[in-house]
Image: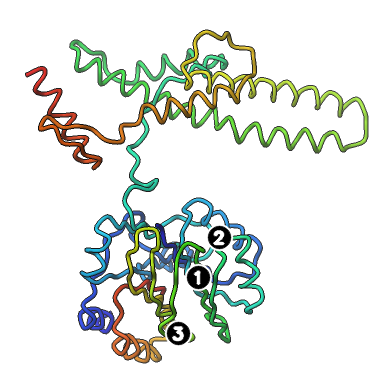
Amino acid sequence: MADFRSVLSFCNLHDMDFAGPPWTYDNKQKEKRNVKARIDRAVASHYWSALYPEAKLTHVISARSDHLPLLLELDGDSQGNKPPSQPRYESMWERDPRLKDAVEEAWSFAPPCSNLSDLMQKIKSTSNHLKDWSVANFGHVNSQIKSKRKILEKLWKKPRNDAREEKIRMVSSELDELLHREEIMWRQRSRVSWLKEGDKNTKYFHKKASWRQSKNRIKRIRGLNGNWTDDPEEIKSHTNDFFRNLYC
Amino acid sequence: MNLLAWNCQGLGLPRTIHELVLLVRAYRPKILFISETRQGEKKIKGLRWRLGLKHCMTQVGKGKGAGIALYWDEQIEIKVLSEGPRYFDVLVNDTPNGRKWRGTFVYGEPKSSERHHMWSLLRRIKPDTNILGS
């Protein structure tokens, strides 16, 4: 380690900051024999860091190999910089009869409130709880659809008998329900309100939804001083300033 | 532009290759450095199409902890300055925005008794940026 440091200082290199787990090597042994260490690194010169000031190093999780992959993103604006998504209410949850209990449980989890800010906290915690509930019980609709399709395909290949027919009927109805949920999901995202559920026009909703997503995104903004900026940090501070001036 | 470096401990198992393909699909690196490939040149070259990174270079080593490979995208220009069984020293031309930099991809010596070779090599080539494994 001392040798490594002396080589680094000799070459004028510095160890880069990283995100993710603090090790890159795990020998996957149990208890006392377990060793975790950060032996895979990215180091950079000051010249390079000035060239890529936004560069971001991440230790990526992987199930294979004892070493974690290192991801070096040179421009900050790729996927890693997206703000975390806010938990939202999904109307497709209503297809699940357990939703009512889940909402009640989530609501009673936070203490009763007496003022508006407490109420806001409570609503926030409820939606967080519902999000967890959805992950645990509702699952990812797209991947479920895919796996059900595969099961169905396999069933069709089997020799014909009553048990098979019964199973096919069951899986088909499950798949149908999932498709319905997917449609509701995209409909909610597309904000098309003039169509009743039950049209399975998912492609159209999907198109609408991606259009809405791009429309909602603030790519650049003009500050109070009249200059345009596309820096995400500046956009944030301009927005904050604007509304603070408006209300205070 | 993204870079990915991974000590995969052998690219022989289909599961590991699948994981690598998934990683490349998720992070879309323009440059991919793999250490401990433990595979011949033919197999390494053949992977280019699955990874969607059309260019590659490899050093095939002997034994368990051996072999390194570098894959890169067509949009990137790579000029090799020097290479050895445990490192690639290259000039990267990030063509769309024209930034040029030197990158050294190193797979370190696992045996501590042999490690001084690595240190003297690094002192000799004096890299700008490098990604180290082990």
Q: Which of A205 and A198 is in front in this view?
A: A205
Q: Name the chain letter of the residue that bears numbered label 1.
A: B
Q: Where residue A63 appears, x then y in whole percent?
A: 52, 57
Could you say which disc has been placed on residue B48 in the image?
A: none
Asked whether the beta carbons under mark 2 and mark 1 sit within 8 Å of each other, the answer is yes
Q: Where residue A176 appears, x then y in whole percent?
A: 69, 21
- Looking at marks 2 and 3 on the same chain, the residue that comes earlier in the sequence is marked by 2
| Three-letter amino acid code at the position of disc 2 | Leu
Near mark 3 (Cα within 10 A), the count class, few <14, some 14-19 or many ≥20, is some
Q: Nearer the viewer, residue B125 or A100?
A: B125
Q: Where residue A45 appears, x then y in whole percent?
A: 24, 72
- Residue A67 makes an appearance in the image: no
Query: Residue sitting at 49 percent across and 57 percent down?
Result: A62
Q: Do labels 2 and 3 share a chain?
A: yes
| Three-letter amino acid code at the position of disc 3 | Glu
Question: Which residue is disc 3 drawn over?
Answer: B83
Q: Do labels 1 and 3 share a chain?
A: yes
- Residue A178 makes an appearance in the image: yes
SS type, badge 1: strand
Question: Which residue is disc 1 drawn over?
Answer: B34
Q: Name the chain letter of the residue that bears numbered label 2.
A: B
SS type, badge 2: helix
Question: Which residue is disc 2 drawn over?
Answer: B20
- Give the image quarter of residue A24: bottom left
Query: Residue sitting at 87 percent across and 38 percent down?
Result: A157
Describe residue B77's horizontal placement relative to residue A221 as left or right.
Answer: right
Compared with A100, A244 (above or below) is below
* Residue that protrudes farthest toward the left in the picture: A248
